[in-house]
Each structure stands twice: as C-alpha cells, then as structure tokens.
Image: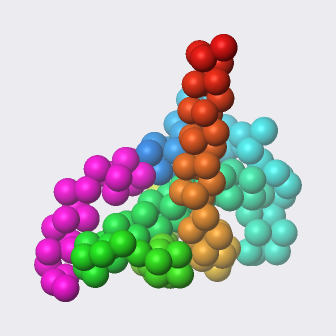
Amino acid sequence: MSIKFAVGATWKCKRFWTWTLAGIIIYLIPVAIRYATGSIVIPFLNWPGYWIGHFIPGNLLEKILVNMFFPGAAGAIAGEVFTGYYLKQSLTIKSKYLSRLAGAMLFVSAWSLFQFWGYQLAIYMPFSPSSNLFESYYVFPLNYIIAACSIFTPTIIYAIKNVTIHISQLIKGS
C-alpha cells in the first residue's frame, strides 16, 4: 500500500493512457471544428442553442458528449487504476465505482482550475471577439454533475465493444 508505487504504476498503465489520450482527442474535436469553420456554433452539437440562465450553456449536447470522456471517464479510469494498484488487489463493484467517482472528481477539479485560470486571462477567439477561449465558471457545477455520471461511461463503452466483437464473430462464423 504505497502511494508512490500506485502513482508510478498508474502512469505506466496502458489503460490509463488510452482513456486519457482518447478523452483529450474527443475534447479537441469541437475545438478543431470551430477553428476550421470559423464559427462558434456547431449546429448538430449546439442544443438547445441558447443559454438557460448562466449555468446551462447553449452547447449543452456538446458539453455532455465531450465531458463524459474528458475529464469525466479519463479521471474515472485513473481513479480505478490507481486504487487497484494502491490496494494491490481486484476491486469490488462498490470500490470500483467509488474510486471512479473520486478520480472523476479529481480530474474535473483540476480541469476546472485550469479553465478558471484561462478564463481569467481573457483570451478571445480570433473569429469571435466576444467569445472567451476558456469556459465560464458558471458551468463548473454542470461539469461536476457530468463527471459524476461519467463513471458509467467506461462500462458502457466496454459493453458496446463486447457486443460488437460478439456480433463480428457470429458474422464470421456463419
């Protein structure tokens, strides 16, 4: 039960890096679309399209889809992997999801701190001079809600992967 061992093993874990890098790439896709199109609005991801108060952004669908992977699921996997190495044993269902929750909350806290710092710098997008490059601190509570739900994202993704593999084996076998 060494924190140093668990941190080192987590940093060397392929599963941790797969989820973290995939999450970052998914997070960057809408950013790339915005810069490629020169528009702040991404039509199919901009639902409801207008802000509801200060706390629900106009790009709610995008926020949910993107944040379910990063920082949510990436943090959840980091928490699960770290806890498994720290305890040096398999995790029960309860400890797995609690460690995922702790990891997701830690990642979303770090990401929110980064976003807050960036928002204070007031860096605006070249194609939309009134839009800050970083998100407003008003949406941080929503980020925590999404992160809490994202502890189930890896389970759902693994289930889809297993069904896909099973179907492809059935197709090949017939």
Q: Quadrant of the N terminus?
A: bottom left
Residue 83 belongs to the span the image colors magenta: no
Query: Where is residue 116 shown, x and y percent of the image?
Result: 48, 74
Q: Is residue 154 left or right of residue 81?
A: right
> Residue placed at 65% from the left, 70% from the top?
149
> Residue placed at 66% from the left, 75% from the top?
145
Query: Where is residue 17 shown, x and y percent of the image?
Result: 32, 52
Frontmost residue, 123 versus 27? 27
Task: Look at the image and tell me whether residue 131 can be seen.
Answer: no
Which of the 4 image quarters holds residue 31? top right
Please, is residue 114 above or below residue 98 in the view?
A: above
> Residue placed at 28% from the left, 81% from the top?
87
Q: Quadrant of the C terminus?
A: top right
Please, is residue 56 above or below residue 58 in the view?
A: below
Query: Where is residue 170 shown, x and y percent of the image?
Result: 64, 24
Which of the 4 image quarters holds residue 41? top right
Point out the stretch of residues depicted in magenta.
1-21
Helix, strand or loop: magenta stretch: helix
Task: Look at the image and tell me whether residue 85 can be seen.
Answer: yes
